[in-house]
Image (tube, grey):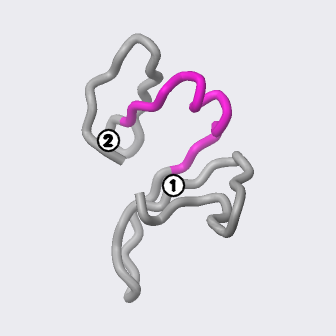
């Protein structure tokens, strides 16, 4: 995740008062997408999950983004 300005090829959506920007082509591959902020004894950060099958051992979410 990073701060950015939307471009013509981007899709924007709002959730819980935050605005998100994602490339339209990528959004069509991963939707629906869910962004959560988690705070656990192991640490805190964003958890991003989608229906897109991921390769390797990452599973279907990324907690290190």
Label at residue 24: none
Residue at 58% from the left image edge and 59% from the top image edge: 61
Disc 1, SS: strand
In the visual, does 41 lie left or right of 62?
left
- Residue 39 coordinates in the image, percent (x, y): 36, 75
Q: Residues within 10 Å of mark 2 (few under 14, many from 20)?
A: few
Residues shaded magenta: 20-34
Residue nearest the viewer, comparing 16 with 57? 57
Question: Label 1: which residue?
Answer: 48
Q: Residues within 10 Å of mark 1 (few under 14, many from 20)?
A: some
Mark 2 or mark 1, whichever is nearer to me:
1
In the visual, does 54 lie left or right of 20?
right
Residue at 46% from the left image edge and 15% from the top image edge: 9
State the separation of the CA atoms marked 2 and 1. Answer: 14 Å
Is 64 rendered above or below residue 32?
Answer: below
- Residue 23 coordinates in the image, percent (x, y): 49, 26
Is 59 rendered above or below residue 19?
Answer: below
Question: Label 2: which residue?
Answer: 18
Is 38 rendered above or below residue 35?
Answer: below
How many labels, in total? 2
Quadrant location of residue 64?
A: bottom left
- Residue 62 coordinates in the image, percent (x, y): 52, 60
Is 55 rendered above or below residue 13?
Answer: below
In the visual, does 43 lie left or right of 47?
left
- Asked if the magenta segment contains residue 33, the reply would be yes
Quadrant location of residue 46?
A: bottom left
- Residue 25 coordinates in the image, percent (x, y): 59, 24
Quadrant for the C terminus, please: bottom left
């Amino acid at each position: 995740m990073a701060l950015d300005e939307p471009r013509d090829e981007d899709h924007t959506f709002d959730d819980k008062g935050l605005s998100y920007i994602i490339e339209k082509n990528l959004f069509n591959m991963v939707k629906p997408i869910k962004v959560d902020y988690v705070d656990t004894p192991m640490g805190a950060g964003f958890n991003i999950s989608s229906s897109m099958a991921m390769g390797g051992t990452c599973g279907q979410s990324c907690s290190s983004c």
